[in-house]
């Protein structure tokens, strides 16, 4: 896992527990918590929508995550230096990159044999 967090270094056990809770929430933000994201074309930005926001327009987002500067515009990010939205987007991008890497690895022997990629029926 390549994802890192940008929280300020915890000085107490309760601050460390807070970080652990946020990371745990981030891990299930898009899979179980009902949050959604939308890539904003030609930008490093992801629009994040809370579960109660059913709008699909990026302009109606609740939060904006910028993956180039590793920031989010939410209040929690402002206070703590990181947040579940930014971490969730980073985790999703890591998982996506890992899938692409695995696909490339699995396709390599087939490409060497002259196929474009691994045949789907194998
Ligand atoms: Zn945020």
Image (cartoon, helix red, strand yellow):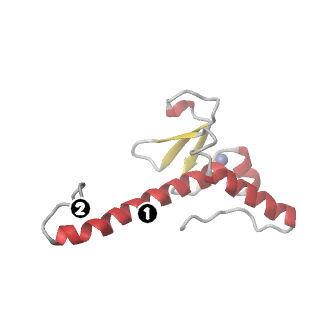
Q: Secondary structure at mark 2?
A: loop
Dot 2, how many residues are within 10 Å of its Cα: few (below 14), some (14-19), or many (20+)?
some
- Seen as rendered, the residue at the extreme top is 55
Other-residue count near label 1 (Cα within 10 Å), few / some / many at <14 / 14–19 / ≥20: some
Decide if residue 98 is on the left or right side of residue 79: left
The residue under the point 53% across, 32% down is 59
Asked if disc 1 and disc 2 are in contact, CB closer than 8 Å, the reply is no
Looking at the image, tell me whether mark 1 or mark 2 is earlier in sequence order: 1
In the image, residue 92 above or below residue 104: above
Q: Nearer the viewer, residue 6 or 51?
A: 51
In which quadrant is the C terminus drawn? bottom left
How far across and how far down the image is residue 96, in percent?
44, 56
Q: Residue at x 57, y 27 (%)?
A: 54
* Distance CA(mark 1)–CA(mark 2): 17 Å
Residue at the disc numbered 1: 98
Residue 117 image point, x, y percent: 22, 61
Side (left or right) of 93 relative to 101: right
Quarter of the image with the N terminus in it: bottom right
Residue appearing at x 75%, y 55% in the figure: 21
Outermost residue, left direction?
114
Q: Quadrant of residue 47?
A: top right
The mark total stands at 2
Does the numbered disc 2 mark a residue whose Cβ is under 8 Å from ligand 1? no
Is residue 4 or residue 106 the one in the foreground?
Answer: 106
Would you say residue 107 is visible in this rendering? yes
The answer to which image quadrant residue 18 occupies is bottom right
Q: Label 2 belongs to which residue? A: 118
- Tell me which corner region of the image, top left, top right, bottom left or bottom right, holds residue 108: bottom left
Which disc, if any, is residue 27? none
In front: label 1 or label 2: 2
Query: Residue 72 appears at what percent x and percent y?
Result: 62, 49
Instruction: Indicate the position of residue 29 as horizontal and vertical percent values.
Output: 62, 46
């Amino acid at each position: 896992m390549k994802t890192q967090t940008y929280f300020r270094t915890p000085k107490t056990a309760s601050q460390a527990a807070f970080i652990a809770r946020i990371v745990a929430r981030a891990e299930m933000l898009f899979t179980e918590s009902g949050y959604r994201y939308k890539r904003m074309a030609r930008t490093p930005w992801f629009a994040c929508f809370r579960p109660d926001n059913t709008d699909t327009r990026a302009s109606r987002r609740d939060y904006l995550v910028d993956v180039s500067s590793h920031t989010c515009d939410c209040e929690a990010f402002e206070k703590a230096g990181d947040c579940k939205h930014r971490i969730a987007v980073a985790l999703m991008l890591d998982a996506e990159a890992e899938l692409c890497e695995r696909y490339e690895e699995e396709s390599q022997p087939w490409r060497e044999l002259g196929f474009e990629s691994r045949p789907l029926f194998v």
